[in-house]
Amino acid sequence: MLEPLLGCRIIRVDGYDTDRLGTFTREVARAGTQLEAARAKARIGMDLSSLAIGLASEGSFGSHPSVGLLAWNVELLIWIDDELGLEIIGSAAGNTNFSHRLAASWEEARQFARETGFPEHWLVVRPESEEHPQIHKGIAGWDELESVFRRCSDLAVNGRAFLETDMRAHGNPTRMELISAAARDLAQKLCRRCPECAAPGFHAVERITGLPCEECGAPTKVARAETYRCARCRHQLIVEIRGPKTASAARCDYCNP
């Protein structure tokens, strides 16, 4: 996706197991933040390839920021350019199938698999609990799932198997869609050049509220403009948001307190 949009060639770097930086199945805890992990991946790729530009992604999973019962996925894609001194980040967030279940029967395991989009979305199974060291990853077929479930149940002291979604991108189409959205966000940022120094990456960093109410004209919490800033020279510009010039009275603290 990025190659035609940016006119570049992306080289995949082998020779480093990124599981050393953290795994979704918890064998290795991620050190630092999501952004720090993405940055570390990009830097490792730059070192191994001897290139001045690096690109890497990192995902995180948890609860929706405002609706706690919903699972939520945030994807970051980082572009580092040491020649220009740039670090640009594309991002996307959305719903995910991130889930787990301790199943006591094959019927329960099969129901969980259906709920999470199996077999298009892969699963991970282990005996007994989420911390058991024996892990079966990348399960992508019903026969395999049943076989692994029964073996794990037989090994478990409690007679159960712990199932969870495989959140690695190549086994999770929902996550791949969000990574694509993060790539589009990154491309849009890189394609906008700074009006001052012409460096790529001139993008919105802040939304400015205050769009006037359609009834009384008072400022509302609806955004009226965005602050664009250059990642290189820090030049910034306030850009009005295209669209309605007034906000609905329903969004006004005076008309609708």
Image (tube, rainbow, N blue to C red):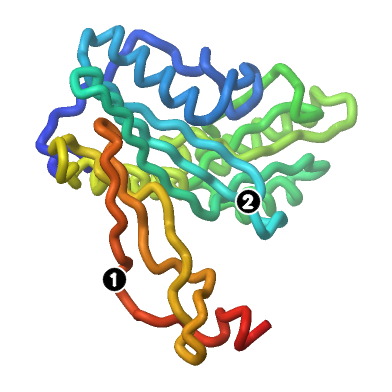
Q: Indicate the amino acid at tag 2.
A: Ala
Q: Residue at x 52, y 74 (%)?
A: 220
Secondary element at image label 1: loop
Q: Nearer the viewer, mark 1 or mark 2?
A: 1
In the picture, measured across the screen, residue 48 lies left or right of residue 130, that is left
Classify 63 as above or below 158: below
Q: Indicate the amino acid at tag 1.
A: Arg
In the picture, measured across the screen, residue 34 lies left or right of residue 51, that is right
In the picture, measured across the screen, residue 162 lies left or right of residue 121, that is right
Residue 50 place in picture, x, y as percent: 22, 8
Q: Residue at x 63, y 20 (%)?
A: 29
Residue 70 place in picture, x, y as percent: 65, 56
Name the residue beneath numbered marker 1: 242
Residue 18 place in picture, x, y as percent: 45, 17
Counting residues from the start of the chain, the first of labels 1 and 2 encountered is 2
Q: Residue at x 56, y 79 (%)?
A: 251
- For the N terminus, which image quadrant? top left
Classify 96 as above or below 100: below
Mark carried by residue 71? 2
Q: Residue at x 29, y 71 (%)?
A: 242
Secondary element at image label 2: strand
- For the C terminus, which image quadrant? bottom right
> Foreground: 154 or 59?
59
Q: Residue furthest bottom?
A: 215
Task: Kindly indicate the quadrant of the structure image that contains residue 60.
Answer: top right
